[in-house]
Amino acid sequence: MYTLYYSPGTASLAVHWMLIHLNTPFSLRLVDFAANAQKSPEYLAINPSGHVPALVVDGKPHAECAALLMLLAERHADAGLEPVPGTPERADYLQWFFYLANTLQPAFRAWFYPDEIAGTENNEAAKAKARAKIEACFSRLDAHFANGRHYLLGNRLSAVDFLATMLTRWSRNMPKPATQFPHLLPYINRMRSLNSLQEVHAREGLTGWITPAAAV
Ligand SMILES: N[C@@H](CCC(=O)N[C@@H](CS)C(=O)NCC(=O)O)C(=O)O
């Protein structure tokens, strides 16, 4: 049994989605950002970073979205969401996980929390740099999908697709969202057609992005 600490649409989304996809029992605890509950002493005892997600596994809390996705894939190996260690696919899986978590996700952090980079007075400059980094990452992903592969690892869905999809969703209100990259769009639409993604959107009350769209 798992307990997920979450806030709708944030970095907890991919973990919530995977729990639903795995069809495993879990309970949810809403972390109220409006009340700054992520910085409360009670929550900091669960995740000292003061971020969501946190996932309690066998009574012990763990954090970091990418690590939680990898942990769930490992604990539910029957679902086939991670390649076997030692295979070439595994190397790609690790590479994409670290690229997304180390490069793309921090750029989104800078986009959504620009004051953390160089203070409020430099928000616009920080956002411009963050946007350029995000678009460069999307270009790299777009090139990866140019050969028509269905998922990041080729023709099999894996845990890293959950992270990639969540991150592409975060760009929906940006000047050049991921859906404007021609080879990323079919991938995003493929992911959007998964019942588990539809379900997590419904449960978190998220609207406006989940319907597959044509190229613009
Ligand atoms: N590296 C962390 C980052 C998580 C993160 O930035 N979460 C954001 C929401 S998307 C958060 O909790 N923001 C609230 C805050 O920073 O006060 C992870 O991947 O889990």
Image (cartoon, rainbow, N blue to C red):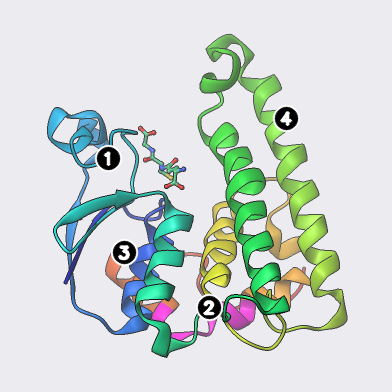
For mark 3, give the secondary structure: loop
The picture places residue 1, in percent across and down from the top left corner, at 16, 72
Residue on which the image places disc 1: 47
Q: Give the mark, 2 or 1, whose residue is nearer the N terminus.
A: 1
> Hey, what amino acid is under mark 3?
Gly
Residue 28 in view = yes
Residue 192 lies in quadrant: bottom right
Q: Point out the tag, 3 or 2, that comes first from the N-terminus.
A: 2
Question: Dot 3, how many residues are within 10 Å of its Cα: few (below 14), some (14-19), or many (20+)?
Answer: few
Say whether residue 182 is visible. no
Residue at 34% x, 39% y is 51
Provide the residue designation for mark 4: 128
From the top left corner, tell me how far across and down residue 214 is, in percent: 71, 77
Residue at screen point 32% across, 73% down: 19
Spatial CA distance of label 2 from label 4 is: 35 Å
Image position, residue 73 (x, y; %): 43, 74
> Farthest residue toward the top?
121
